[in-house]
Image (tube, rainbow, N blue to C red):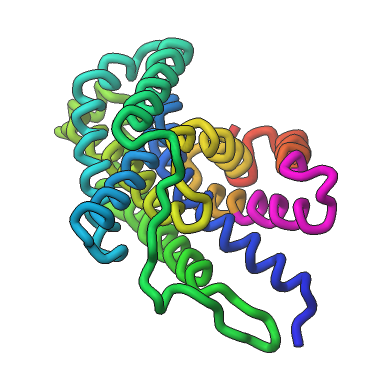
Amino acid sequence: MLPPVFGVLFDGIAYGMLLFLLSVGMSVTLGLMNFVNLAHCAFAMLGAYVTVMLMKDFHWNFFATLPVSFLVTALVSVVIERTLYRRLYRATDLDQVLLTIGLAFISVAVAAWFFGTTQQPISVPGYMRGSINVLGLNIGIYRLFLVAVGIVVTILLVMTLEHTRFGAQVRAAVDNQRMARGLGIDVDRTFAVTFALGSGLAGLGGALAIEIVGLDPHFAFVYLVYVLIIVSVGGLGSIAGSFAAACLIGISDIAGKYYVPELGAFLIYLVMVAVLMWKPAGLFGKR
């Protein structure tokens, strides 16, 4: 029989995978595009509300809503990117922060207007509930599913952004737009696709998060803090760094609440400070 510490470790990794799915999109847009998007979790909230609406009003299966949440969020993000964000790619960080935090506030107000301020629970399929017993350790099936999704997303992103022509075009467009255009790269389209990918992943993460953390209009701000911590600790633009940071923060959060409840969620801030003092650019970031 496995000791209780393994249960805490698994729950921490599962929670970390949820945070990773929420944050990896910002790692893509902030790290690769150098754009500070503090409305990132607003896109995650949008994906979550798409899932809630499809399940409650149209009686869709939970898994059928996931690709729709990704696509709807990606399409909405492209509209916002083309009409608002594109004007600020060469603006200062402060301008980007002011616009995107304003959009986050607007998203909270819109969500409260249409859906109310109460929690929006959903019901995942029965076979995703409960747990399985492994060597005396009860492992939640849904949490195991989150771990699997996180690993698959990590592999796909690393292969796409680091080992494909598209990934090379994104890096070239960020490093030198004029040179990239001269080489025939459609920089505007590349940025739009990259932003849609990052936002779509946020929408997917938001949809998957409902079962674990619930959903209300404050989602866009509550989890923005976690997302920023993970991106900072992992290192800008590093998918592997975000993955490692999410696991570290998830385990720290669960272990802290289990073993040192007097510290509560404050432990993750101590971990963040310790890591950034050790490696100011993050675990896998470049100075």
Residue 198 pos. (x, y %): 35, 42
Name the residue nearer the viewer: 86 or 118. 118
At a point 44% along the width and 13% down the height, the residue shown is 98
Q: How many marks?
A: 0
**Which span of residues is magenta-colored?**
247-267
Residue at 52% across, 76% down: 130
Image position of 161 with respect to 279: above or below:
below
Q: Quadrant of residue 10?
A: bottom right
Nearer to us in this view, 16 or 254: 254
Depth order, front residue of 230/137: 137
Residue 171 horizontal side relative to residue 17, left or right: left
Predominant secondary structure in magenta? helix
Q: Position of residue 95 (x, y in %)?
A: 42, 11
Image quadrant occupied by the C terminus: top right
Residue 184 position within the rendered picture, expressed as x and y whole percent measured from the top left = 14, 33
Q: State whether residue 76 is above or below residue 104.
A: below
Q: Residue at x 76, y 45 (%)?
A: 264
One can see residue 175 in this view? no
